[in-house]
Amino acid sequence: MTPSLELQIKTLPNSPGVYQYFDAEDKIIYVGKAKNLKKRVSSYFTKTHDSGKTRVLVKNIISIKHIVVKTETDALLLENNLIKKYKPKYNVLLKDDKSYPWLCIKKERFPRVFLTRRVIKDGSEYFGPFTSVKTVKILLDLIKELYTIRTCKYDLSQEKINAGKYKVCLEYHLGNCLGPCEGLETETHYNNSIKEIKNIIKGNFKESLERLNTLMLDFASKMEFEKAQKIKEKLDRLSNYQAKSTVVNPSINNVDVFSIISDNTHGYANFLKLSNGLIIQSHTTEIKKKLDETNQELLELFIVEIRQRFNSQSPEIYVPFSVDVGENIKVTIPKLGDKKRIVELSERNAKYYRMEQFKQIKIVDPDRHVNRIMAQMKVDLRLKEEPRHIECFDNSNIQGTNPVAACVVFRNGKPSKKEYRHYNIKTVEGPDDFASMEEVVFRRYKRLLAEGESLPQLIIVDGGKGQLSSGVKALETLGLRGRIAIIGIAKRLEEIYYPDDPIPLYLDKKSETLKITQFLRNEAHRFGITFHRNKRSKSAIQSELELIPDIGDKTITNLLRKFKSAKRVKEASLDSLKEVIGNARAMKVYQFYHPKKEK
């Protein structure tokens, strides 16, 4: 497996969809569906295949493309459409189109409505394909309960009916047919039923519901309650029936769908081509911005280019917002229903493509990945320059004891741990977070200025307006106000606060900028808490050893260096103590812990 192919597999989403394998000539050789694209495609390259043809297929795969869909059912239908469209070498092709059931309304006088697996171009209307025969049979049962349509295959031409060639059958006597074969039902009345049946198949029940409701009230007004009750039962069945698909909808025909999402440097555009409600083509690409173009400008360029490239003659396009692509194309901006869901599906494919590109760039070109994130952070946080060097401060104290602070340093979006610093609070007594923040920010940048070190482009303080004001005050004292951007991040709702701005900024919860900002804050908190715990532990140990008379700090340090804890000092023998701190001090330590053994 080539590095390029391995990279494509690593960045596949764990979502339902359809995958397409291409050979060295960039020709589709296999199309498949998957509940989880990444797992399914990976299995081709990690499993040992018993079939020789499968091994040959895997050997010939040079590149992979995929289309993300909402459900497994959609993946099933889309796979079927693509196999019919491209006829891949390694796919089973059902040439007679019997793969899925359709509902046919036959082109004839008094049209029949029936299930079929064969789509014949004879002028008849076909609806589907449906995901299962059961769905079609339920729909057919509903139609037969609501309408009296014929099931016979007679040629009901006017001449043959006038000649009396046919006689009514059992279906007529059971009330399931009104006998058009003997001229007992007019063609107009029958075709009105067919019109309502078409609407029901398409999911438009309005006309049928209105007609049945009027009929029910008419029977009730005539005191024909049994007939009214039967109509009411039909109304209930029709109201409860639902069978629609977001990928397949016969009302959407010969339409191009376009969408785009973008970040600071690139746009990601998707194109879906629909024919008879079926997706038959998908294409997604990355567009590098040159002059900070808007999404509208990029999408208009993409639409013109793609329609030329794929020679599309579709008279209508669906887009998420208004575009100007010429007078000969109808532009629709769907607000709800199946059309809206198709546009959302296009946007979802664009988003997944963007995520893949990010993952691949991170692996193959880390510098480009960093440059993109830095550019995005500059825009998101409203900075004058990219925050290549960021420092974050956090205070730690518990009930006012051992107050400390931490400063963590990030360069190019990653921790620079050798530059992390701890601070003991020196000028503040008690738990005063604001004064402590002012002290450590002042001390940090006073030292950097004195040593001629580079200053960060961004300072983040953990906390809201109070901590931010303290940090700003320290920068003002040093004459750095305005030279370094400083913000505060509050924990409760992740608000970003700016100096002199009472309204906080709320970043997108999924944005890289917020993730890096949270990482900085959490890292500063972790680093500060660790130092605080160590200091409290060390303080507790030293306080016990300091109770020993005539023992100084140097002796305590030597004891802890050797024995690691006050408990081990207490358990140590007199000889062991003498080896570390000499006879006189060893005797004092030993007698402190063992007063009863004093001679």
Image (spheres, rainbow, N blue to C red):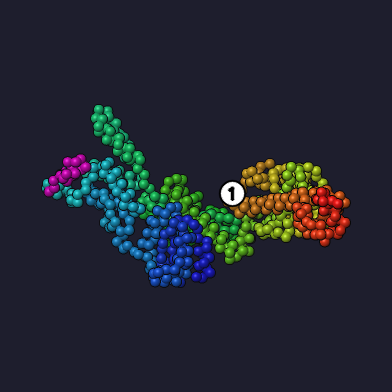
| Camera-side residue of 214 and 226 | 226
Q: Residue at x 27, y 41 (%)?
A: 146
Foreground: 501 or 536? Answer: 536
Tell me how many marks there are: 1
Q: Mark 1 points at which residue?
A: 509
Q: Is mark 1 on a helix, strand or loop?
A: loop
Left or right: where does residue 352 sit relative to residue 438? left
User: Image quarter for residue 54?
Assistant: bottom left
Q: Is residue 171 magenta?
A: yes
Res. 471 in view: no
Identify which residue is drawn at 30% across, 36% down. 233
The residue shown at (59%, 49%) is 508
Residue that appears at 79% across and 49% down? 544
Q: Disc 1 residue type?
A: Lys
**Residue 399: x, y in percent?**
74, 42
* Residue 599 location (% of width, % of height): 86, 52
Viewer-closest of 571 and 497: 571
Which region is colored magenta?
Answer: 165-183
Q: Relative to residue 61, is residue 371 drawn left or right?
A: right
Give neighbour class at mark 1: few <14, some 14-19, many 20+ (Cα, 10 Å): few
**Relative height, residue 460 to residue 221 (above, below):** below
User: Where residue 151 appears, x then y in whole percent?
Assistant: 21, 48
Q: Is the magenta stretch mostly helix, strand or loop?
A: loop
